[in-house]
Amino acid sequence: MTCFEPDLKGEVTYLKDFEIGKSIIGISAISGNAMALIARDRANTDYIYFLECQTPPHDWYVSISWKTDEKLLSVHLSDDGLLLYTLSESRLSSYVPDPFDGILQRRWTIDLAHGEKHCTAIPNTGGAMIALGSSNGTVTVYLSGGTRAWSTDLSSIITALAFSNSGDLLAVGCSTGDLHIYTGHGDPVLTRKFDKSIYSLAFSPGCTNIVVGFEDGTTQIFGSDLGAPPLKTSTFVCPARHVSFSRSGETILICLDRKLVLIDHCNVVWAGLPTRDRESALTLLGAALSADSSYCIATIKRGNTADCLRFYSIKLPPQMLIREAEAEACIKEGTTLFQRKKYVEAFDCFVRAEKLSEPSLFTAFCKGESLFHLDELKRANEFYRECLGFNNTNARSIDACIMRGITALRLNNEDLAYAAFSDAERLSPPNDSTARYLLTLVQYRKSKGGEMSCPAPIDDYSVDGIPVNLASFIPSVVPNKYKKCFIMPCYSDEAGEIPEKKMFTTQVSKSIDTGYNVGKGDAGLIYNVDSDSLVGVFEAHSFPRIGPPSCPVSRLLA
């Protein structure tokens, strides 16, 4: 059995019951001030309830009660409360709640094979897709419009599914103990084999942790490296029915058959189930944790009495909350100092943040960038190499891939940078050109001025508020100490003449956008309009006279 750490006790207090008058089959996560549940009356008829609240955790009310002819199994509500999904014995359905008119507008349904068991999961942010796992071993991901995005066959019973908050990752657990991680686009990331069946799964919001619940009652918390030993192992008398994270990712609520368990910063801080006076033993059917960990809602089965929703307030150990707040404050202060180019002070802030919480890809990256700007390249490279050590599930979000790619460029590893930016491009929205530009930049670096088209890095790229000078990645015969980059269009007959005569220092009729100021020390890229390629990189020795652009420079930045 798991035990408590000394002096790390949380407090959970009974608030109130919310009577439904029916048997509750399942509840969704709390999505802002809304949630959904499914229930069954004594006539064996199922209902979908949409609940809203003005002042959580009080004043919840039912705004939609929807009767259905299906035998429902589970329900999901998107984080914005705009999409609702239900799984029944025969269908997967999508609805749009309309609390004003008190109705659910069905968007689409997908018929399921008779006799198979299914499980589902959605990403919290937006609910733009839903994953369906089947007892026949098939995993299928549908977009919010009902079209199939991708599918795979694992040839073993799917027992648990979990998306990361943004939908960048999907974890699939099997009865054979296999854990598979895929990107949101269906690309396999990793596989790990356990010796027991997986019962439940959950990603932390930043994908820094993943919780795996097993059929024998063991629950393990893993860090970003699933190959490493677990950060925490707890053994219960029964498997975890449900696992959920707070918005911060530090607090975990585990729902057992007759007990709720709170874990904060990998420490078990509370376990139990408060009851009312003279109340007999209760059975838990599910639970949901609020975004700020201040309260939770549990589904309670009370013997022959109708099921109810029970509200509990939560108080976490204050020292943990203080350390978390201090770490966040240090990161915020360090980011502000970095933006002001106070790199020594920024470095100290990121070091303090790690001491208060734990090292992360972001803080390691920020330490490296701070030292890079201080010209302490040897020390900076130590932290850049530390960044590359986070090559795991944590590095499968777009920002994490881009940070790893930039780190690889700092270490002059174009191949690793290309792989990281390729991952970022696969995870990026269709119209996001950031990763595509960085891929082209890597290709240009490898070409060293050859016939390779590259968009002009007109501005810094910002990673969570940390500006990265893209000009420093452009190859040149001079040291990469550029302040910023600009591009100068020319024709084939001028491509050799401009660098030869150093025409950056003279008036050129065909030049860059008039709104972009160029000064001494900036990087100039010669763009050959005829061949659609960059033909040279040079340092601007003085401010050039700017004329109107004569080629579609905006097309390069698309």
Image: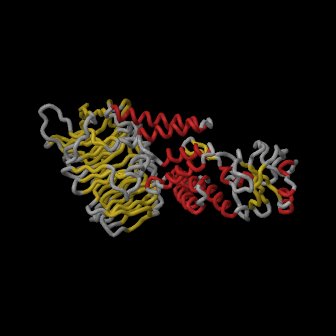
The percent position of residue 24, horizontal first and vertical second, equals 24, 45
Residue 488 percent location from the top left of the image: 79, 52
Q: On the rendered structure, is 430 left or right of 491?
A: left
What count of labels does the image hold? 0
- Please report the residue visible at 18 percent of the width from the left and 50 percent of the height from the top: 237
In this view, the residue in front, 490 or 231, is 231
Residue name at image x 43 percent, y 55 percent: 393
Image height of 178 relative to 120, above or below? below
**Residue 399, image x, y percentages:** 53, 50
The image quarter in which residue 267 lies: top left
Colour convention: secondary structure
Q: Using the image as rendered, state which of residue 406 and residue 27 is in the foreground.
A: 406
Please tell me whether residue 268 is drawn above or below residue 456 in the rendered image.
above
Q: Residue at x 38, y 31 (%)?
A: 54
Residue 529 in view here: yes
Q: Give 216 or 223, whichever is nearer the viewer.
A: 223
Residue most toward the bottom?
Answer: 155
Q: Is residue 36 visible?
A: no
Question: How far across and down, in percent of the image, does residue 50 sit?
Answer: 35, 41
Q: Is residue 215 found left or right of 544 in the rendered image?
A: left
Q: Is residue 557 left or right of residue 386?
A: right
Q: Residue at x 43, y 33 (%)?
A: 326
Q: Is residue 346 left or right of residue 79?
A: right
